Image: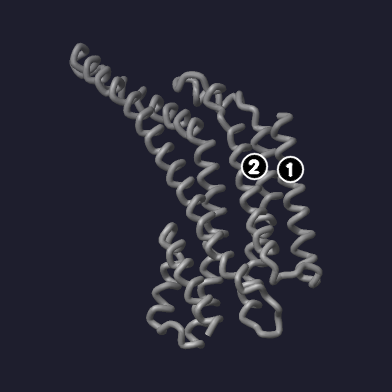
Amino acid sequence: MGIAVILLIAVMLISVICIVYFGADCAGKINRGAAGAGVIYLLFPVLSGIILCIGAIGFDISSELNESYDALTTLSEMGIDFSKIIVYIIECVLAFPSFLLPCIGLIRMAVGSRKKSYDYDDEALRKLPVISAVIGTVFSAAVAVFVCFIAVNVLGYVVSGLLPMILFSIFIGLITFGIGFIIMAIVAPMYILAAGAYAVAVSLPSGICAAVCGLGFCTMEAVTIIFTIAFMRKLYKDNAISKKKAVIYSLLSALPAVNIISQLYMANKLKRSETL
C-alpha cells in the first residue's frame, strides 16, 4: 500500500506541474516556438503512463484467489483488498490532466506555427511530430504485447482447465450410464465461471497496462495527426506537394510505425520549402 501511495503522489505532482506549465503557456510565459517547449509537453503523458503501468502491478490478485475453485468464494466473501483498487482509480483520475493538457498545448503549437504573427523555431517543430510518432508507435507496440500476453494467458489457462473437465465429464457420464452428465451439467458452469473469474484476475494488470498505453497512443496520435494536417496545408499552399499527396500523407500519419516515415518525408519537404 505504501508503494501505491508513493505512485499516487508522483502522478499528482506530474499533473500539477503539467497544469502549471500549461497555464504558463496560455499566459504567454513559455516560449512556445522553442524546441524544448514541445518536448516537455510530450514528457508528461510518457511519465504518467509509466507510473500507471507500474501501479497496475498492484492489481495482481491471483495469489489472493488461490485455486480457481475458490475464486467465486473469495470474490463473494470480499477476500480481496479493494483499497488498492480505489487508490488506483484516484491515481488514474489525477493522471488525466497530464494526458489531456499536453495534447491541447501541442495542438495549439501546431496551429500557431502556421501563423506569421508567432515566432516559431521551424526546425524544432519539424521534429515534434516525428518524436510523437515514435512514442506513439512504442505505446502501440506495448498495447499489442499486453493484449497478446492476455490472450495467450487466458486461452492457455481456460484450455488447460476445460480439457480435463470435459474428459472427466465424459468418463463420469459413461460409468454412470448418463446420470453423471446431469451432475456435470450443473457443476461444469460453476467451474467455468470460477475459472473465468480467476483468468480475469490474472489478466487484470496486463489489461490495465494495455488501456494506459492505449491512452498514451491516442494522445500521441492526436498530436501527430494535427501537426501533419497543419504542415501538409502549408506545403500544399506553397505548391511543394500535390493535394493528393497531402491527403495520402495525412491519412498515413494515423498508422503506427508508418507515420514515422511519413513524418520524416514531411520534415524534409518542409525544410526544402523553407529554403526556397
Camera-nearest residue between 82 and 254: 254
Along the viewing direction, whichever of 222 and 155 lies nearer the viewer? 222
Q: Could you say whether the residue bearing mark 2 is in a helix, strand or loop?
A: helix
Q: Is residue 223 above or below residue 7?
A: below
Q: Quadrant of residue 187?
A: top left
Q: In this rendering, would 258 be left or right of 216?
A: left
Mark sitting on residue 44:
none
Residue 60, position as x, y percentages in the image: 56, 30
- Residue drawn at x 46%, y 88% is 239
- In percent of width and height, residue 107 lies at 62, 70
- Counting the numbered discs, the total is 2
Q: Which mark is residue 10?
A: 1
- Three-letter amino acid code at the position of disc 1: Ala
Name the residue rendered at 78%, 65% in the picture. Answer: 23
Label 2 crowd bin: few (<14), some (14–19), many (20+), radius 10 Å: some
Labelled pair 1, 2 in contact (Cβ < 8 Å): yes
> Would you say 256 lies left or right of 129 here?
left
Can the viewer see residue 223 in this picture? no
In this rendered view, identify the residue nearer to me: 174 or 13.
13
Q: Looking at the rendering, in which quadrant would you find the N terminus?
A: top right
Query: Is any part of residue 262 visible from this angle?
Result: yes
Measured from the top left, where is residue 245 in percent x and y?
Answer: 39, 78
Mark closer to the chain start, 1 or 2: 1
Q: Is residue 70 above or below residue 247?
A: above
